[in-house]
Structure formats: structure tokens, C-alpha cells
Amino acid sequence: MGEVTGRTGPIVVMGVAGCGKTTIGRLLAERLSTLYAEADDHHPPDNVEKMARGIPLTDEDRAPWLAAIARRIAAARATGGLVVSCSALKRSYRDILRNADPQILFVHLLIDQARAADRVAVREGHFMPVSLVASQFTALEPLQADERAVCVSATQTPERIVAAVLGQLPLVNGSASAAASHR
């Protein structure tokens, strides 16, 4: 696969645990020849410990994490681009990220709860236990028409997912309404 250049604005690959955010985020950043950031790396140690014990995070727990990601997004404006893997489950969370850069594009990886739980159950070396998958679906708020977004099934191969996203970029680079009509 060749590289794609000329994309402006950050991309947040979002969705519940187990949807493939990290895999797709890394591949997308590689294809776009831009920086990649993993939002999980910005969690305070207390958050990681809490999730590892199977306790869902509250909005208050997430506030410093979201602020750190927003700072990373804002800083990337000067460098020309960034792909971030971040759950961004609630509209209020996405608003914090969008305030860092209004050109943000959300790539929502769609998956059902059973498949997400299956993926998390076999994942090695990650702090998120399968017991928290249901809480992620409970917290997930649908993208709204005014949010620049592309929604893609997470059940495809990573290569197909990235190709689908890249195929949508020309359609969503201009307006929120274009993004909303291509979900």
C-alpha cells in the first residue's frame, strides 16, 4: 500500500474496547505519513489501576486523560497531522477533543458487544479486562450529524478498514454534513 499525503487535521480512531483502535490507528498513521498517539498511554496510573481491577472510569477520572489527549492534538496542529486511538465514547469527550482542533475527524470502528468481548478476552498484556466491555457499550453515545465522522465495520480486515477510511477522506474533508451522510 502506498502513502497518502495532504490530509490536514487530526483523526481520532474511536470505539469500544476490542474494536481495533490501536491496530487501525497505527496503520492509518503509517498510510498518511503522520504521527500516531495511543490515548491509553496518557491515562494516569490511578486510572489504569482502577480499570485493571474491573472498575469503570467516571467522567471525573477521564478528565485529566482527555485533557492530555487534547493537548497532544492541539500541539499536532503545528506539525501537520496526528492519528490518535481513543475510545471517545461520549459526545462530551469528543467535544473536549474537538475544542483542541475543530478539524478533527472521528473514525468510529463499529462492532457488536459479543465480538468486542471475545477480542478483549484473548488480548494479552492490556489492562482492560473483559468485564468492562459492557460498560463501554453503556457509555457509548452515537455520533451526531455535526460531528465530522466516518463509521466503518470493525469486523473487516485491518487493510480493508484503512482502505475504507482513506476512501472517505476526500468526502469528509470539506464539511460535517458530508461526513454525516457517509456513515
Image: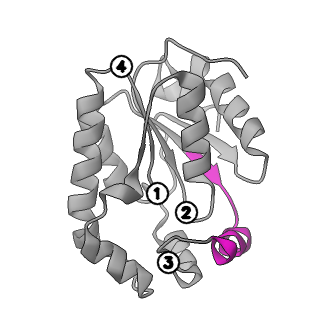
Between the C-alphas of marks 4 and 2, the distance is 27 Å
Between the C-alphas of marks 4 and 1, the distance is 23 Å
- The amino acid pointed to by label 3 is Ser
Q: Check if residue 114 falls in the magenta segment.
A: yes
Residue 87 position within the rendered picture, expressed as x and y whole percent measured from the top left: 46, 57
How many discs mark residues in the rendered view?
Answer: 4
Query: Mark 3, mark 4: which one is toward the viewer?
Result: 4
**First to last magenta residue range:** 108-123
- Label 3 or label 4, whichever comes before in sequence order: 4
- Label 3 or label 2, whichever comes before in sequence order: 2
Between the C-alphas of marks 3 and 4, the distance is 35 Å
SS of the residue under disc 3:
helix
Q: How is the image coloured?
A: one colour
Q: Is residue 166 visible?
A: yes
- The amino acid pointed to by label 2 is Val
Mark carried by residue 168: none
Evaluate if marks 1 and 2 touch, with contact meaning CB atoms under 8 Å apart: yes
Q: Which residue is mark 4?
A: 80
Residue 175 position within the rendered picture, expressed as x and y whole percent measured from the top left: 47, 21
Q: Nearer the viewer, residue 143 or 49?
A: 49
- Quarter of the view holding residue 158: top right
- Label 1 or label 3, whichever comes before in sequence order: 1
Q: Which residue is mark 2?
A: 16
Mark carried by residue 87: 1
| Residue 117 position (above or below residue 26) | below
Residue 182 position within the rendered picture, expressed as x and y whole percent measured from the top left: 65, 32
| Residue 139 position (above or below residue 106) | below
Q: Which residue is mark 3?
A: 135
Q: Is residue 113 left or right of residue 135?
A: right
- The amino acid pointed to by label 4 is Gly
Q: Residue furthest front?
A: 125
SS of the residue under disc 4:
loop
